[in-house]
Image (cartoon, grey):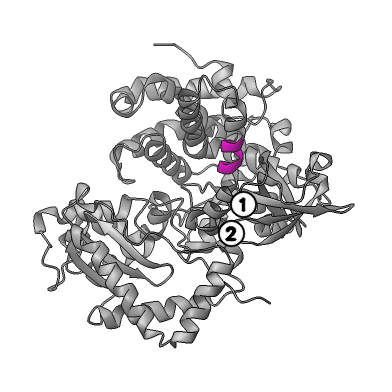
């Protein structure tokens, strides 16, 4: 076992590569924390982590301390956001005695829980576990002693600042990159996720000369779409909070769009913009030339471009990678019939289309079709048939005339959409012999497998008491299962399920929304599973 932490390991949690004047102090502090943890708690630590991760845990706690001393506003942002959401400083622990902008016993205890449950995900460790309490006591003793003389890291603070008049998208994007991938608080979360994804990409494409492009595109995509386990927030939301709500750019960060990656047709340019059309959806965009150095290479109208774009302060900026192809009718047809490609821009419709009205109509039809219930239980091999029959029932419920149906089909064909393959079935029984269909009022029809025993309904013939706890835990932990389905179980059946009546399960209910954000970080916020085709011409 290495006997100490070296500067290279400490700098892994920093947004810079060259040692600053204060790094020696905090490295020494990290080693003091490590020595205490190794001496008193190695048996427990070694059950979950190798020595490298024990070192990083020590640096992680020392970085929290450095954050408080330097006032970089990272930890404070989390506490303030948690307070806004839940009217208390932190989950799990009593914070009646809590000192803002200082080190707190509850902070360290929570951070230990967070690191243990993020750097490894094989086991869920209860926040009230005794060893968090014991480790916290040892660590606080060290931090209390260091508090009076610890130096500010003025270099570090500059990495979390941005000029109030900054208009450049790339400066804003760089701050988000720093927060998600170079900040101690998200080291065990988004940084390790990125590191794992990059390792897979390198292994799969190690002989490919374009590997650097793949890595750059992956990092850019993760920067835009990643949510943190803490509060299921995106990088732009953390940036808005860390720079402060009074900062002129705080709202601009919140208003930054999702990234759209896909195929576009080149439609011309002027002095300021390049005109492009998203092939799958026919949506038109003006891409600012400030962000795209290759505009002089664009000559032929309807040249096919693959690129990523994001909106910042009312302009669309290039973000990610770019390549171009000659016109290809087959590619265009495939794109227009790709639901996935159309969904890439669906978020732009959520503000303009009658999404809520459409989902409400579908919801009402689902309950009519399913005897008044929004959930149905069945063998897995019956799921596709159930959804097909429900879809037919919903279409009939619209009471469209033959002429209206034909006009809708014409609009879709004009848009290049010829329909999906409804005959393609999925083998759900590979996962579970039984499943359920749930109508999610935020998104639409949802399928869930291996969770039936979380629902003790009389009409659920597949409820099995001995599988109940396992199915509840899957319902709560599985990121692909929606927050709404998990809460449907809790809101309606927690008094009927032993898991939620006593012990650890009952304790989880006190902070269940925080935990659902933690477990379902990238899918906690459900979005409509609707894409529009064949729109009327305006």
Instruction: Give the magenta part as a residue range.
Output: 217-222
Give me the residue at 43% from left, 11% from top. Answer: 2
- Position of residue 202 relative to residue 84, above or below, is above
Residue 214 is situated, as x and y percent measured from the top left of the image, at 57, 32
Rendered location of residue 126, percent (x, y): 30, 45
Which of pointers 1 and 2 lies earlier in the amino acid sequence?
Answer: 1
Q: Secondary structure at mark 1?
A: strand
Tag shown at residue 168: none
Relative placement, left or right, of 198 versus 426 is: right
For residue 9, which quarter of the picture? top right
Vertical position of residue 264 compared to residue 490: above or below? above
Report crowding for label 2: few under 14, some 14 to 19, many 20 or more residues within 10 A (C-alpha). many
Looking at this view, name the residue that lies furthest to the top.
2
Real-space CA distance between mark 1 and mark 2, rounded to the nearest whole angstrom? 7 Å
Q: Secondary structure at mark 2?
A: loop
Residue at (74, 37) in percent of width and height: 158
Q: Residue furthest front?
A: 329
- In front of the other: 393 or 437: 393
Q: Quadrant of residue 68?
A: top right
Q: What percent of the width, then of the height, locates residue 448?
A: 28, 58
Which label sits on residue 345?
Answer: 2
């Amino acid at each position: 076992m290495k006997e100490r932490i070296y500067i290279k390991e400490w700098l892994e949690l920093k947004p810079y590569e060259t040692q600053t004047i204060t790094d020696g102090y905090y490295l020494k502090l990290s080693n003091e924390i490590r020595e205490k943890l190794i001496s008193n708690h190695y048996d427990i630590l070694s059950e979950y982590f190798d020595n490298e991760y024990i070192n990083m845990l020590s640096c992680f706690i020392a970085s929290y301390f450095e954050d408080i001393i330097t006032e970089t506003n990272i930890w404070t942002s989390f506490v303030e956001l948690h307070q806004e959401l839940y009217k208390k400083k932190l989950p799990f622990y009593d914070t009646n005695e809590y000192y803002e902008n200082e080190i707190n016993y509850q902070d360290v205890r929570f951070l230990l829980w967070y690191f243990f449950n993020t750097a490894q995900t094989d086991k869920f460790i209860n926040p009230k576990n005794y060893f968090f309490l014991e480790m916290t006591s040892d660590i606080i003793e060290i931090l209390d002693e260091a508090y009076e003389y610890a130096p500010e890291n003025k270099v570090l603070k500059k990495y979390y600042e941005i000029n109030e008049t900054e208009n450049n998208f790339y400066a804003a994007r760089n701050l988000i990159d720093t927060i998600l991938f170079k900040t101690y608080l998200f080291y065990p979360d988004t940084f390790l996720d990125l590191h794992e994804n990059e390792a897979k990409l390198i292994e799969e494409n190690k002989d490919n000369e374009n590997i650097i492009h793949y890595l750059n595109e992956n990092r850019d995509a993760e920067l835009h779409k990643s949510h943190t386990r803490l509060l299921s927030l995106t990088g732009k939301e953390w940036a808005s909070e860390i720079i402060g709500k009074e900062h002129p750019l705080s709202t601009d960060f919140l208003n930054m769009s999702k990234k759209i990656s896909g195929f576009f047709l080149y439609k011309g340019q002027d002095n300021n913009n390049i005109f492009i059309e998203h092939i799958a959806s026919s949506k038109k965009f003006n891409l600012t030339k400030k962000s795209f150095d290759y505009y002089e290479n664009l000559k032929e109208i309807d040249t096919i471009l693959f690129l990523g774009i994001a909106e910042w302060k009312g302009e669309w900026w290039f973000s990610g990678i770019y390549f171009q192809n000659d016109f290809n009718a087959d590619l265009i047809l495939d794109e227009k019939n790709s639901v996935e490609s159309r969904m890439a821009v669906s978020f732009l419709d959520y503000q303009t289309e009658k999404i809520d009205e459409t989902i409400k109509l579908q919801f009402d039809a689902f309950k009519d079709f399913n005897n008044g219930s929004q959930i149905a239980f069945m063998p897995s091999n019956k799921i596709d048939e159930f959804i097909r029959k429900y879809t037919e029932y919903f279409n009939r419920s619209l009471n469209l005339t033959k002429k209206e149906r034909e006009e809708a089909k014409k609009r879709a064909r004009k848009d290049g959409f010829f329909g999906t393959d409804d005959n393609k079935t999925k083998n759900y029984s590979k996962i579970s012999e039984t499943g359920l269909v749930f109508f999610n009022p935020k998104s639409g029809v949802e399928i869930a497998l291996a969770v039936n025993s979380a629902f003790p309904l009389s009409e659920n013939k597949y409820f099995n008491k001995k599988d109940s706890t396992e199915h509840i835990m899957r319902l709560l932990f599985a990121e692909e299962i929606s927050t709404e389905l998990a809460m449907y179980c809790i809101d309606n059946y927690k008094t009927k399920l032993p898991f939620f009546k006593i012990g650890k399960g009952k304790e989880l209910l006190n902070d269940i929304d925080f935990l659902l954000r933690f477990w379902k970080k990238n899918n906690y916020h459900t979005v409509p599973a609707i894409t529009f085709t064949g729109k009327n011409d305006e």
